[in-house]
Image (tube, rainbow, N blue to C red):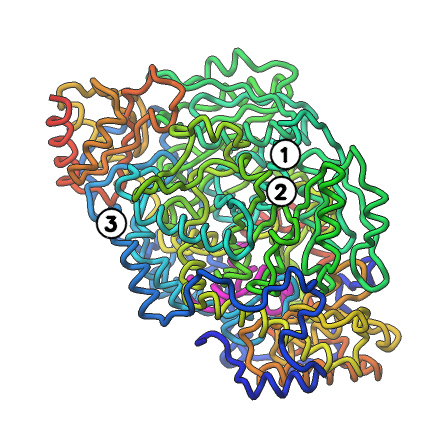
Amino acid sequence: MTMLKEGRPTAPQAVREEHMAPATATGNRALMLEEPLIFEIGSNDTTGVDFAAAPKAVSRLGNLARKDAIGLPGLSEQETVRHYTRLSRQNYAIDLGLFPLGSCTMKHNPRLNEKVARMPGFADLHPLQPQSTVQGALAVIHELAQWLITLTGMHGVAMSPKAGAHGELCGLLAIRAALEARGDARSVVLVPESAHGTNPATAAFCGYKVEDIPATPDGRVDLAALKARLGPDVAAVMITNPNTCGLFERDLKTISEAVHAAGAFVYCDGANFNAIVGRVRPGDLGVDAMHINLHKTFSTPHGGGGPGSGPVVLSEALAPFAPLPFVEKQGDKFVLVEEETVEDHHGRSFGRMVAFHGQMGMFTRALAYILSHGADGLRQVSGDAVLNANYILRSLADVLDAPFGGSGPCMHEALFSDKGLAEGFTTLDIAKGLIDEGFHPMTMYFPLVVHGAMLVEPTETESKAALDQFIMALRSLAERAKAGDEALKGAPYHAPRRRLDETLAARKPVLVWTEPELAEAAE
Amino acid sequence: MRYLPLTDADRQEMLSVIGAASVDDLFVDVPAEVRLPGQIAGLPDHAGELAVERHMDRLARQNLSAGEAPFFLGAGAYRHHVPASVDHLIQRGEFLTAYTPYQPEIAQGTLQVLFEFQTQVVRLLGCDVANASMYDGSTACWEAIGMARRITRRGKTLLSSGLHPHYVSVANTMAKFTGDALVHEAPRLDAATDIGALIATIDKETSCVVVQYPDILGRIADLTPLANAAHEAGALLVVVVTEPVALGAITAPGHMGADIVVGEGQSLGVGLQFGGPYLGLFAAKQKYVRQMPGRLCGETVDAAGQRGYVLTLSTREQHIRREKATSNICTNSGLCALAFSIHMTLLGEKGLRELATLNHALACQAADRLTQVPGVKLLNDAFFNEFTLILSKDARDVVRDLAGKGVLGGVSLGRLFPDAPEIGNGLVVAVTETVTVEDIEALAKALEEELA
């Protein structure tokens, strides 16, 4: 069996015949309809859009007119709607059921947010319109910024980062700019082993050497080891709180004090802010910079892999270095401060991170979400998120190993390991079994510090009935994996596809469609 | 709270399973001195849907939306008509509320879309491979510079003066931290692009040349000589496309020798949205695929032998390679890629060419009409749907005054290049299929009054 060092198989075993359903002539299975690629069903002469005739004009394209066939098949509107509707039905989604992907905060995406984002006054605005014509849009950015600052107890916020990892970049660039401003070149960023992969990748991108911070056996940062490592070469410490083991870093305030005393900064990965919103303010823990994934805590849709939005709240020490542009209120007017208007007091900004002003379409959604919840509702959000996770943790503790179950209540996610599964059975088997039970699997094989990790984040938008059904399903799968039920290794049986061969995909990458005759000729 | 399903009875029952007395007790690991005893003061309580909608609507109405005015803004973001079915389809919950396709057996919808998207992007840009999207054009541009550095192991990049100034700013910001040397100056008001000057500047230290096509002033030129000069010096050619509709009319950058082509895909399917979320396009020659940033979707088979799709070559990525990854990107622009791909499928080659032809013809018509206005000259010899007018006074003032008359007349070079006052009379005007003959007349009349 091909597998990664964490014990994750990457290629499936062949399916036994008794586990195959009888074939249909079409390949369809009732409501599950097979759908070819647009390149196999469309034609270059078909279109689903009608245009007015172009006025007569003499071409001014120079000698650059594109004469070759581009190879972009079209479909009529009906065929297009059917193609994408059929494909959509091959996806799992929050709208279908519990999506307990740890660290990803797959909560319900309210539809009011979608409606608001589509108001023409927001959706049909050009980013470079004169500021007098976009005062309401700037007001949205400002209002959301004020909420984020208040909820986190921080000094300022950079709104333009496009996603969490981009926010990390923003935070580390601000730290580096602040260090350079005081003529203090430092070369090392400390990152716990349990961190998201984006943390070390970001630090390395900013030119820092990455060093691991050890953890204590109870799953938290080793304070003594961290203190011992601090020194004049350490620029920043990146800490996720609550951490990826689902635990609150109790010592963060002490850590921050030690880090500050050593002249360094504290970056907090805010991916898990959902667990603590309204309960504790990162500013009170001494954090200097923290990104907030609006697509996690503040419910903007994940869209099958983005777009996200990653505003970064900043301490007083870092706020002057925030990137351009930003929105300021001057009297009763909102002003977008960008290159054209940047004044002396913003001269320390480290520059621009993106074209235009950030993810406006996510700002409107997140603001609608925040206003819907209010301060009372947001506190309820974290309370219910943590309650749901602990309910899962304690309800399954007798069948699944919870490596940090003795470390006190978990926060918003429950962490289990593959310890105790029968020989040859893996976390992947349980995950694929969950698919057959009608659930999206939990995050698997992350964090890296736990072998065969299963990280379950139910979020606050699940009912008790949904949780109970999930617990029942996971319990049944754990029992099967412990009993060595071979059938589990073939799961999923009922999904649009059986286990896919990732090894083949990587060994012989096919990343674009090629006409069969050309593909054959190339071989 | 309408989004929170637990009842108080549920909470009590769950707490008893957990063995805790209250929800607050679950936060015992948060030190008491920082734990908030109740809701944060000074913020409003929860609100019903109607109240929130009213509030947001009031703010939306304080803006002049593009559809309410004769509208001619471009400069990296273009207003195109997006067919109704695009927005309907991207709002299907199975697309909208799915995650990155980590479990391919139940994400074949998203994965097949990404495979189709990659193929469409490859063909449109004239490259061999494309990734599953980046944040936007400006970050894709920066990632391309980083990729060229990894391939050539050289640190000097020549940025064309025709590159979007925000893209230049983003690259400058990043280069401060990576140590790349960027060479750039503001554009001049010439009809010709700066390709000749770039060719003369390429040397053996040059990692790549980055050129925009059509450029920020709307100019277009054959990039083949530039590609040849770059390759002779061992450098790469990176081409940035901010208006992909243009490639329905003009030669693809990949067919002129570009090694990496990046772009802003917002024009198709995504809409203006005040600048984001947008869609970064990223494509390259086959031989560079393992140096590409971002997610890639590939074809494979399942255990029963059926064709299917997975995310692949992830050993380039941060979740596997951590500090050795080709990029720190995780979330990309999946839903915008879907919108782009649906719009492209609706158009097909026939529709895309018709759309491009219509854009170009209307732009020609607008250029002819606007240059009849005293005090207005046309900079460009060649253009697609965007061109630069040279006015008899500072274009920033003109744009502001036109807005006062309800005409959104273009983007001034003063806003784009505040440090280059010598080109301050330049006005960049974009003309898409959404512009009517009446709109063109309205802009011409307003300019006549303004420049009189």
Residue farthest along the right direction in this orientation: A423
Discs 1 and 2 share one subunit: yes
Residue A66 position (above or below residue B120): above
Task: From the viewer's perspective, tell me whether residue A78 is left or right of residue B285.
Answer: left
Residue A244 position (above or below residue B389): below
Residue farthest along the top direction in this orientation: B200
Q: Mark 2 points at which residue?
A: B293
Neighbour class for label 2 at 10 Å: few (<14), some, many (≥20)?
many
* Marks 3/2: CA–CA distance: 37 Å
Question: In terms of depth relative to the viewer, which is nearer, B226 or B135?
Answer: B135
Residue B275 x %, y %: 40, 44
Discs 3 and 1 share one subunit: no
Q: Mark 1 points at which residue?
A: B147
Q: Name the residue under label 3.
A: A51
Tag shown at residue B107: none
Let me know if residue A426 appears in the view. no
Residue B50 x %, y %: 31, 70
